[in-house]
Amino acid sequence: MVIAERGIMTRQLFAVFVWLAALLVSPTVSMAQDAVVLDRTLAELIAQVPGHTGISYFDLVKQVIPDLARDETRAIGHRTVALRHIAGDGFGGTIPDPIKIGVLRAVPFESEGKPRIAMLIDIGKIDDLGEQPHILAVFDTNGRMPTLLDAVDVGLDRVTSLAEPALVRIGERDDAILTTSQHFNSAENYTWTSLIFLRGGKLGLIDRFLAYSAWTCTLQKTQAFSFKGVPGANDRPAISVTMNDIGTPPEERCDDRALSTSYARTATAVYRWDAGKAQFTADSDAVQRLQEHSAEP
């Protein structure tokens, strides 16, 4: 009996490791396989900003963290410009002290036909905090020195990054920015995707979406979101959001229970710019309903 139980535990652990490895390379969890090997958004703090001779990313980050100072091994500060959380009141609000700059990501984009730079700044961790802070800052790139337009906290979970891809075109003159926040919990993965836009020099949240994936002895459940710009009336930006919820029997059995039946569910909603409300609104609650229907049991 002891040998048999050990055999079952070994198969369970092996299957979990296989599932976690698959998550790291699967595009269904907002991480493309080539992005694991090469992330083109990564930037060195001392590197020159493309197109801006003599200007480094440090010069840009210092506009967000005014007392930032660096030596040969690190960059540390203690205060930031006024920050709000992209998801609104009740989120974020805690900034580490000291601020220690970690991974830095940068991507050029366009807003209302004007060139901009978006930077995602890792400012260090806070022990026992679920929503680790991460700063998204956007800069006007006209002129020799890019100037800060806005900065917000976009941390929604333990690990935050730019999505892959980091941008989605939502009109002839606009890109939306995608960030992800996630954590692993045993045989589960939670990934928040924030769909963010810049208008009038201010960052705003179009919406945020939770993908929940899990492995059990009877079912492998995978959720993912995809985003695509669609034609909008009067040249107004619009974006289609599609959620896929897929369940398949696991390749490795870990007990004698009957395997679950495969399924595939899809929901789509189109978010369009509402000038009267000065925000994006969805034409359907289909995505929201599927998220609620397929949420963690």
Image: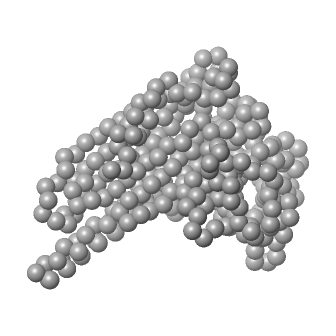
Question: What residue do we see at 48% from left, 34% from top?
Answer: 241
Count all numbered tags in the image, as a single digit. 0
- Give the x, y percent position of residue 80: 79, 58
Q: Is residue 177 or residue 165 the one in the foreground?
A: 177
Question: What residue do we see at 28% from left, 47% from top?
Answer: 247
Can residue 104 be seen? no
Question: What residue do we see at 14% from left, 59% from top?
Answer: 257
Taking the image as shown, residue 176 lies to the left or right of residue 285, namely right
Q: Is residue 88 or residue 217 the one in the foreground?
A: 88
Can residue 85 be seen? yes
Taking the image as shown, residue 186 lies to the left or right of residue 89, namely left
What is the quadrant of residue 280 in the picture?
top right
Question: What residue do we see at 65% from left, 58% from top?
Answer: 133
- Give the x, y percent position of residue 268: 43, 31
- Give the x, y percent position of residue 132: 61, 61
Q: Is residue 127 or residue 76 the one in the foreground?
A: 127
- Give the position of the N terminus as an image quadrant: bottom left
